[in-house]
Structures are given as structure tokens and as C-alpha cells.
Image (cartoon, grey):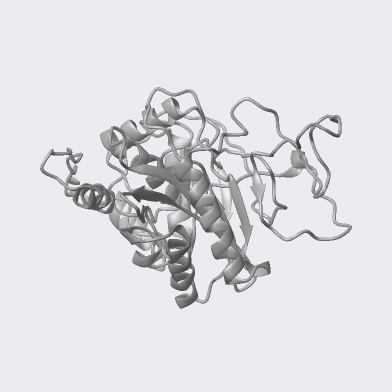
Amino acid sequence: MTGSTSSAHHCPHPKGGKGTRSRSTHARSVCLTNNGGSEEEDKEGGVLFHVNKSGFPIDSHTWERMWMHVAKVHPKGGEMVGSIRNAVFLAKPSVPPVPNYRISMSIPEWLHAVQNYMKTLQYNHTGTQFFEIRKMRPLSGLMETAKEMTRESLPIKCLEAVILGIYLTNGQPSIERFPISFKTQFSGNYFHHVVLGIYCNGRYGSLGMSRRSDLMDKPLTFRTLSDLIFDFEDSYKKYLHTVKKVKIGLYVPHEPHSFQPIEWKQLVLNVTKMMRSDLRKELEKYARDLRMKILKPTSAHSPPLERSRGKSLSPRRRPSSPTRRLGRRDKSPALPNKKVADLSTLNEVGYQIRI
């Protein structure tokens, strides 16, 4: 995998036209709620990328913008673009069949089949994300987007792979799925990435897509959640990335028609400010709570909340009343005299990584 874009012979044809909007990806303070959404224009380690909001067929504006971006960032630039767009004949791309679960399959075999399907779709290097993922959409809406991915059979990025992984593992109640997000730093820039964590029969693993083979799927062999997270951290170190934060969500329900959104970051860990032993302790406590299913979503039916450490969001109670337990758990160390940023200025980006 490289940072350059590849030829876009696998792209659909343009049609129509729509407007655009842009968002920034500067570093943000920790937020206690999901600020989901996808970007029409974003920065990935200083490199611009776009999101197709026009659906399919892709409109002419998005289509031309994609080719302009490819010509700008590809090593061969306009020469490569011209060779494809002016070609008299282009081979018809193959459409991989969607995997079907068979009773004779073990769970690891099924997860391997799902991951192989995503690898067959390939990682999207065009600089344009073909499927818009609004993270606060109900699960039912995201599953419709996943169906569209199987119909179009286009290359995908890491956020799309998480949604597709959830869709393909629905109906397997022994498989618990939950999002794991990473924020890393390299050469002064911040990068974001997300994978789908898997728990089954006392073992952890993951599904996903990345430019790097050791930053996507992991086998279902890790005895603890902390072992899985530390393995990702060790993989990042190979590419000189420093993991700054890890965010872990709740189990995703297996009901594809659910109107509940995915809980993306129930636990937030500020990795650089915690000892590994403390990280392990918090991760194992959270994993235990997940398995016992005592954690509940906090963003499904409640407005965004801004919290200063040490101050309760609950109304005043009588001394005899127990303290209300907050659903969101931010394990970042408290910083004295530091105010939480205004949530109206915070935006959640589509998770990716360019290394």
C-alpha cells in the first residue's frame, strides 16, 4: 500500500450535478457524544480527499472533481488520467460474489470469508470516498448503504469497511461487533482510522480495511481486548506513528432494521497520558462491562452534553440518593483549570489513515 492513488477503472459513470460543503480536521478536544457525519471535503494528513454525496450514478461534478484530484496527487498525474479516460477499450471489472454463510463453516472461517470479500473490493486510493457514511444515521439506514456497496462493488475505505462488516456479520448472534477508532500522530499531522472489533467465544479480533495489512483485520486469537489494542499500537510503531487516543464503542445490535445509531466512542482513552498497566486495567474493565451488557447508549435519545471534569450533569439529589452513573466513560487524565471546548465547534471526521 502507498499514499498515491491508483487508476480508477473501477468507477461508475457520471450523471447530473449537486453542490458541496467542506469541513476541517484540526485536532479537537474530547467530546462526550458522537458528532457523526461524513465529509464532502476533508484533509487526510494534509492531503485533500472528497466524499461522493450524489449517490449513483455519480454526478458530473463529483466525477470530474475525482479525476482532477487523481491528476494532482498521482505520481504520473494527468498522463495517467488521460491514458484511462481516452482509452478505446477498458477491461470490464469483475464483480465479486457476496459471501454466503454455510452451516458447515466455523466462525473464524466465516470472518475470513467476509474479510476476503472486502479485500477483493480493494482499498480506495482515488481520493474520493464513494459511499457517504453519516455516523449518526440509524443502523437501518447504514445497512441500506452497505447493500449499495455490494451492488456497486467499488473500492472502499476504512469507515465503509466497518459498515460493510456489520452488514455481512448480521444474523450471527455469537459474534459481537463494536467499533475501535484510533487517532495517531506522525510528522506533525494527525490521522484517524477505524476498524470493527470482534468478540466471539472468549476471543477478540477485527475486520477492516487499510493501506497497511497489519492495521485492518486481526485473527480471532486475542484472549483480551487489551491484547488486541496493544497489537494495533505495536503495528503503528512500525510506521513511526504515535497512538494518541483510542475510542471504543458499544456492541452493535444484530437487528438490521433498528433505528438506534451506532455508539462509536463509549470509552475514550488518552493513550499518551496513561501507563500501559492502567490502559490494560481500563480496557479489561470495559470489556467485562460489555460482555455483561450493562452499558447503555447515551446518544440515541439525548442531546449533546458538555461536561467539565468533576462536575455532575445530574440535578441535585438528596444526600441519601446514590450518584447517577454516567454512560460515557472518558478515561483521559484530568487537566487542572482546562475548560472543555464548545461542542458547537467540534466535528467528527470520517476515519482514515495515510501512511
Q: Visible in this render: residue 7?
A: yes
Horizontal relation, residue 90 to residue 353: left or right: left
Q: What residue sits 46% from the left and 31% below the top?
A: 54
Horizontal relation, residue 272 to residue 55: left or right: right
Q: Visible in this render: residue 46?
A: no
- Residue found farthest to the right: 337
Who is closer to the viewer here, 350 or 68? 350
Q: Position of residue 32 (x, y in %)?
A: 68, 43
Q: Is residue 85 above or below residue 52?
A: below
Q: Position of residue 322 (x, y in %)?
A: 75, 35
Q: Quadrant of the N terminus?
A: bottom left
Who is closer to the viewer here, 233 or 251? 251
Instruction: Report the number of numbered marks.
Output: 0
Horizontal relation, residue 211 to residue 17: left or right: left
- Residue found farthest to the left: 104
Q: What residue sits 82% from the left and 49% below the top?
A: 310
Q: What residue sits 27% from the left and 41% below the top?
A: 153
State the image quarter where residue 210 is shown: bottom left
Q: Is residue 153 above or below residue 201?
A: above
Q: Position of residue 48 (x, y in %)?
A: 55, 55
Who is closer to the viewer here, 66 or 270? 270
Horizontal relation, residue 59 to residue 23: left or right: left
Q: Position of residue 215 (x, y in %)?
A: 40, 63
